[in-house]
Structure formats: structure tokens, C-alpha cells
Amino acid sequence: MDDETRVEWREWGPAAFAEAAEAEQPLLLSLSATWCAGCHEMDVETYAEPRIAANVNDDFVPVRVDVDRQPRVRERYNAGGFPSTVFATPSGAIISGAGYLGPDGMRQVLDSVRETWADRGGDAGRVPRALADDPTPVGELSPAVEAYIAGQLGEKYDEVHAGWGDDAKFPLPRTVEFALKRERGQALRTLDAVRDHLFDDVAGGFFRYASGRDWSGVHHEKLLDTNAALVRAFANAYLYTGDDAYRRPAKRTIDFLTDDLWTGVAVGGSVGPAAGRDYYALSADERGETTQPRVDLTAFAGGNALAAEAMLTYAGYTDDESARGYAERVLDFLETDLVDDDGAVTHYRAGDDAGERLLLGDHARVVAAFIRAQQVLGAGLDVAERVADRAIAELHDDGSFLDGPKEGPGLLDRPFRPLDDNVEMAGALCDLAVLADDDRYREVARETIEAFAGAADRIGVQAADYGAVAARLGGEPLVVAVADDPGSDLHRAALRVADHEKVVVPDAGALVADRDLERGTAAVLVGETALSASTPDELMAQVSAATRSLGGNN
């Protein structure tokens, strides 16, 4: 039993569903997270109430789900945020779902679900449409896809407060990166707002989001995924502008990840909001004298891969040895502890506890991290290929990627094809195709993006990176191949070319495009254009010439 509640929680797994089937009772799924303030409040206010707890224990099979450790459960049963309170049949079908419920609301819902179950039993449940395994909306890639999503930037942009949308403001780092090449003013103003409103000036790191359009009502969770993605976005803004106003938050956030969330070998998952609502208004000394926020030091594969990629992105632009060193340690942890010899990635390990294997999001981010390592450090390609090959073999199905194996209790055996993870994998495969000199990866990426192109006009700014990958597949990549050691002046200049979607090939000898490069030179390749350089200044001039030959659109 959880110390904060009187509910007799079971763990997510086959045993809970078998118990529900044998008892002919519905399940109550409580989707929670260590960083979720409302989840802990609901434990104290609702599940600790004796009569509610007794009703739950008597008439339901209660299951507590950690949504960070069980992302496939999160995607299938999320009721619009966390906590999610979901009632399901023993087969996993959803009877009813809600978010936070206080005692009165919970009593009403318990009574309603009991009545529904008594009247209809297992027939009361439904399977969400996204899990029906309907064909994806296949379409043809064209410049119109990028143009439509770029147009959405302007339509949804908040000219008054920056960011996109007129409700709660999330930082949307991938949307920012899409805008950096298309609407740079919007991207930079949004990063300014994120820095001014969501950055913790005392300890570093970014908070999750703001509930108000004007960035008020900040929710003070600090999640690894959000912070790693923002490090990369701010670093990319620095690449284009050279402005320390974007470099400094990236650096301080790396310090936060490698200090407050560092486990000794990797980065933990989150810092929750503090118990005292004014905690984040305190100085560092004052914070040290009060109750500290909850910290989850579980080292997740996807989050750590994203962190390593972001640190290497920053290091590539700044020569920051600390960021590079921590990234190398994270990559070593991933390769040693979470990636097996056949390329399968395990979601996390915590002592004897281990998460699921072969989750698409983990594979996409691990591939991207080791691709970045190949470009910055000159090593990592073999791991990227191994992990990508396993994902393609196991998860690429009927034109797109499944989020994981079609197996498990509840609705886990139902196929689910998440757009965001498909886009991340497709983007990583575009880079891998260049570095591995293997067009097979590009073809898988193309098929994956085409699998959703029939509904491209329904893709909003939150998934703007779909437009970025579609554009890359519709054109030729900007490749900078350097026949020199990683870390040389020429290689460092290649990493600083002001296009965050470029691909840098270090230590290139026999090269793509059937050319041999003389040691100490570089080649800029865009389609049929190939221009050589032997100094950093020449390289920058040749990049400008190559991109001008395509009208500045690469």
C-alpha cells in the first residue's frame, strides 16, 4: 500500500488484469509521475480518504502507473494530462477517464462507473480510434507540405507575448528549430520569452510550461526531455546569431543536468515542484534551508540520448570541453547499459528493475545521439546503425513505425503509430543515410513521412518538425565532408556552418559523390554541386556559394 494513500495499489502488468478478470471487476488506472504535483495532491486529498479508498479496494482493481517508466501505457490511457484517472475493463478497453478528481468528484465517478459496469460489463469499454490499426493517411511529399506548416507559424504566432497559440504556453523547442530557418524572428522572440519566464535563474534549467498566454502561471517541474531539447534549441539559436543571450541559458542548463540530475554515470529524469509555492522565488541559500523538491534519478534511455545529443551540439559550436566530456560519459552509459549487442534499447535500468525494450522513442533518440557523436567526435556510427537496423526490422510496419512491440496487457497489444516519434526517427535516418552512405535509410525515412502526408494539412505547429523532415526529403542535404581529424580547425569550422540541419562527415577520405579528398581539405556537397576548401574561411565561402546555387534553400 502507498504510504500516502489507503488504496491497495497493484503494479501494471498481466497479474492485475488477470485478477480483474477473475473477480469480474473493472480496473482503476492511476497514471502518475514523480514530478506531478497534482498526482501527489490527489493521493493526499482523495485516495487517503477512508471511504473512497475502501470503495476502490472493494469494487475495483487499482493499478498505479508511472508514466515515465511506462510510456506506452501513458500514450494509450492518458486522459488529457496527469494525474489521469482511467477505468478499464479486464480486456483493457476504456470505460471512463478523467484528470484530477477531488473527493466529491471521485465519489460521483465511482458510482457512475459501478452503474455502467453493472449494466454492461465488459461491453462498456471502448478502444480509442488511434489504436484501431486503420491505414495511415498516406500521401505524396511535395513542397506544399513544408509551406503549409511554415504558414501555420504565422497564423498561430502570438505577436503580443511570443510563442504559438493563445492559451497555455509550452516552449516547443522543435517548433523553434523549424522556425529558425523560416521565421527566425518568431523563433528568437519565443526563446527570449522562454528564457525570461521559464528559466530558473538560481539553479538553472527550464520549467515545463506556463498556464497563461502571457507566460504566467508557471508550472515548476523540470523534466530531462524538456531541458535537453531546449539546450539544443538555444545552442542552435546561438549558431545563427552568435549572441551569448542564447548560449548562456544552454550552458547553465547543461550545468543543471550534470549537477542536480547527475547520477554519477547519466542524467536523471526530473525535478518536481517544491512543496512551498514560493520556493522558486528564494535565493540559493534560502532554498537550501527549506524542503527540497522531489528528484527522480531514473536514467531513461531516450532522455539521456537527447541530453547527449544536445551537449554535443553545444560543444560543437563552442568547444566546451565539460559538455563534451559529460556527453561522452552519457553515451558510454547508453552503449554499455541500455543498448544490447543486437541493437535493442532498454527504456531504463534501476537496480534489478528494467523497463521495456524496443520502444520507438528510445531508438529514435539513441540513433540521433550517436549520429551527433559521429559528426562531433568521429565515433558512434556503428551504434547508430545497429540501433536503427533493429528498429527497422522490429517496428517498421506497413510504411511507418509502431511505438513498440505489439504485446503486453491491456491495450499494449494494439498497434500505435505516434507521429512525433516517427518524425524523430525519420529525421535521424536522413542523417544516417549520409554518414553510412546507405540510401536504404533515406528510403525508410521517406516512406515513413509519406505515411502521414495525406493528413499534412491537419498537422499544426506543435509538430512542425514534420515539415522540416519533409523538406529535407524533398531536397538535397547540405553535407560538409572534412578529410581531417575530428577537432581540427577545418572540422570545427564545419560544425559551425550556420545550418543546424547540415551533416558533417569528419575524417572523410574516400567520400560520398565518388570523390577522394586530399588530406587537410573539405568538400561542400549539395546535390550535384561539390566545392572544395582547405581553410576555414574558404569553407565558409564555399558553403555560401553552394547554398546560393540552390537559391538559399537547402
Image (cartoon, rainbow, N blue to C red):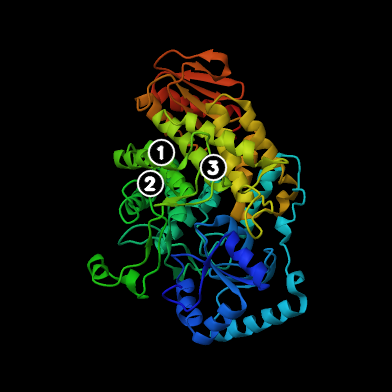
Tell me the residue at 74%/50% (across/down). Answer: 455
Tell which tag, 1 or 2, sits nearer the viewer: 1
Name the quadrant of the C terminus. Answer: top right
Q: CA distance from mark 1 to mark 3?
A: 15 Å
Residue 502 visible in this rendered orientation of the protein = no
Q: CA distance from mark 1 to mark 2?
A: 37 Å
Tell me the residue at 58%/41% (across/down). Answer: 425
Residue 144 pos. (x, y %): 71, 43
Residue bearing the label numbered 1 = 336
Nearer the observer, 322 or 403: 403
Q: Is residue 250 left or right of residue 290?
A: right
- The amino acid type of the residue labelled 2 equals Asp
Residue bearing the label numbered 3 = 363
Q: Residues within 10 Å of mark 1 (few under 14, many from 20)?
A: few
- The amino acid type of the residue labelled 3 equals His
Tell me the residue at 51%/74% (across/down). Answer: 8
Seen as rendered, the residue at the extreme front is 22
Q: Is residue 458 left or right of residue 539?
A: right
Nearer the observer, 414 or 6: 6
Q: Residues within 10 Å of mark 3 (few under 14, many from 20)?
A: many
Nearer the observer, 255 or 22: 22
If you read the primary sequence from the N terminus, does the residue marked by circle 1 or circle 2 appear first? 2
Residue bearing the label numbered 2 = 243
Q: Residues within 10 Å of mark 2 (few under 14, many from 20)?
A: few
Residue 219 pos. (x, y %): 45, 68
Tell which tag, 2 or 3, sits nearer the viewer: 3
- The amino acid type of the residue labelled 1 equals Thr
If you read the primary sequence from the N terminus, does the residue marked by circle 2 or circle 3 appear first? 2
If you read the primary sequence from the N terminus, does the residue marked by circle 1 or circle 3 appear first? 1
Dots 1 and 2: beta carbons under 8 Å? Answer: no
